[in-house]
Image: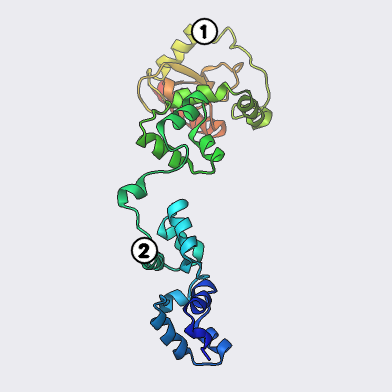
Amino acid sequence: MIAAYQDAVWLKEKYIGQHLTTQEIAESLGCNSGTIWYWLKKHGIPTRSKAEANCGSGIYTNREWLEEQYCIKRLSARKIAKLAGCASKTTILRWMKRFEIPRRTMAEAKKPTHEIANAESLRALYWDEKLSAKQIALRYDLDSTCILSWMKMFDVPRRTPGDGVLLRYEDETYRRERLIKAPRGTDHYNWHGGFDYKGYPTIFGENFKEGVRQRDGYTCAVCRFAGKDVHHINYIKEDTVPENCITLCRQCHGKTHYNRIYWQIALNNLIIKRIVAYRGA
């Protein structure tokens, strides 16, 4: 009577197809694993290494599956190894060699194969439909960096940052979202207590400003460079007296409109020194 393991087709189905170990096959037949190993070699059935036996589901030992992943889906050996639960792409490459599956050249591996990986499709999506790289990536389940690299590869020009902003504001949905997200009321960065804008009093004219500049030596109290802006230290326009006004340059004057408490304390200390110096002179 011929033992089952002497049938090459049966043994290959158990070992390769079902991914059983030599020990499991031997136990099912009531023989020694060494016997199974001997007949595997005799039938020319490719055996697994120790590392291959310990990793993954062994699905990579199926020629049809491996050809589908590498040749049809064009996955890399590294991605196939990850999909099959292998520790290394070397296992996949070894089985590809056993099955005589031809490997791609470096140039073929780098060549994109996606349906939109061509100049015409990218131009139509980016320029005709006016989609951003991120929007194209979301539509085709890709990464935006992949889209940008393809655009560079196929010489598809990119929009300038200014064009991108104008394009976004043409979208009514985008404008509405911006309005909803815009800070309002007390959350706005220009909120200063809720008082209405009031003009300067008539006393705050050119003669008064020139007196303040002359007292301060026409120099900015902060940076010590030339200055001609006159600033109210306590931010109250009605309190237009020399002790509450100080000379600043245009740049430093702009800084005082933010973090007002800090600038009020700092400029109060500076104005005292300037008044004392002016009166002492």
Q: Nearer the viewer, residue 179 or 210?
A: 179
Q: Residue at x 61, y 24 (%)?
A: 175
Q: Residues within 10 Å of mark 2 (few under 14, many from 20)?
A: few
The residue wearing badge 2 is: 100
Picture layout, residue 246 above or below residue 71: above
Tag of residue 205: 1
Q: Amino acid at mark 1?
A: Gly
On the image, the x and y values in percent for residue 272 come to 48, 28
Quick one: which residue is furthest to the front in this view? 1
Q: Residue at x 55, y 74 (%)?
A: 18
Q: Nearer the viewer, residue 128 or 276?
A: 128
On the image, the x and y values in percent for residue 92 come to 41, 65
On the image, the x and y values in percent for residue 197 come to 64, 16
Q: Nearer the viewer, residue 123 or 236?
A: 123
Q: Amino acid at mark 2?
A: Glu
Label 2 or label 1, whichever lies nearer to me, is 2
Picture layout, residue 195 above or below residue 108: above
Picture layout, residue 209 above or below residue 192: above
Left or right of 42 in this view: 115: right
Who comes first in sequence, dot 2 or dot 1? Answer: 2
Tag of residue 77: none
Give the CA separation, mark 2 to mark 1.
92 Å
